[in-house]
Amino acid sequence: MDNEILKYIPQRPPFLFIEKIIEKNENSLTTSLFLSGEEDYFKGHFPSKPVMPGVLLCESAFQTGALLMGMRGLSADQNKTALVTRIQNAKFKNIAQPGETLIIKVDFIEMMGPAAFMKAKISTTDKTIMTIEFACTLVEQ
């Protein structure tokens, strides 16, 4: 687990769906997650042919987006949390299975008031798993 991830987002295992930072710059962030097959959701999500649930794929993109916001200094105020407020154009192109390493790339599009608009692509070395556009808004907590 990359400690820089834990520094910027509040999620913790077992609800943390990113584990390494692969590449970062001001407007994009790439993280990864290795699917060992031991994750609890695989036990019940098609046990004979395990598949990572689409909602958890989305969550890995959202967590990478929140991490990008934190690294950009957009959520530096400890009383504010980045929460997903819009999801658009989610396209599931392939399935994610045990033994694969997911590569989660999020691009920052623009900031409008307290909302950051982003787009994400999740892939493996040989296939695109999903693409999605989303917004996170900073809210008081």
Image (tube, grey):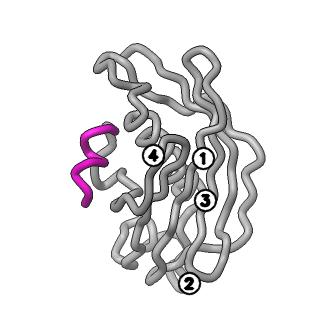
Element on which disc 4 rests: helix
Is residue 60 shown above or below 108? below
Circle 3 packing at 10 Å, graded few (<14), some (14-19), many (20+), is some
Kind of residue at badge 3: Gly
Q: Read off the magenta span.
A: 1-9
Which residue bears the numbered disc 2?
49
The image quarter in which residue 91 lies:
bottom right
Secondary structure mostly taken by the magenta-highlighted segment of the chain: helix
The amino acid pointed to by label 4 is: Gln
Callout count: 4
Q: Which residue is mark 3?
A: 54
The mark found on residue 107 in the picture is: 1
Q: Residue at x 31, y 48 (%)?
A: 5
Q: Name the N-terminal-most of marks 3 and 1.
A: 3
- Between discs 2 and 3, the one toward the N terminus: 2
Residue 10 location (% of width, % of height): 31, 37
Q: Which of the two discs, 1 and 2, sits closer to the camera?
A: 1
Which residue is depicted at the point 69% across and 57% down? 131
- Classify the position of the C terminus by image quarter: top left
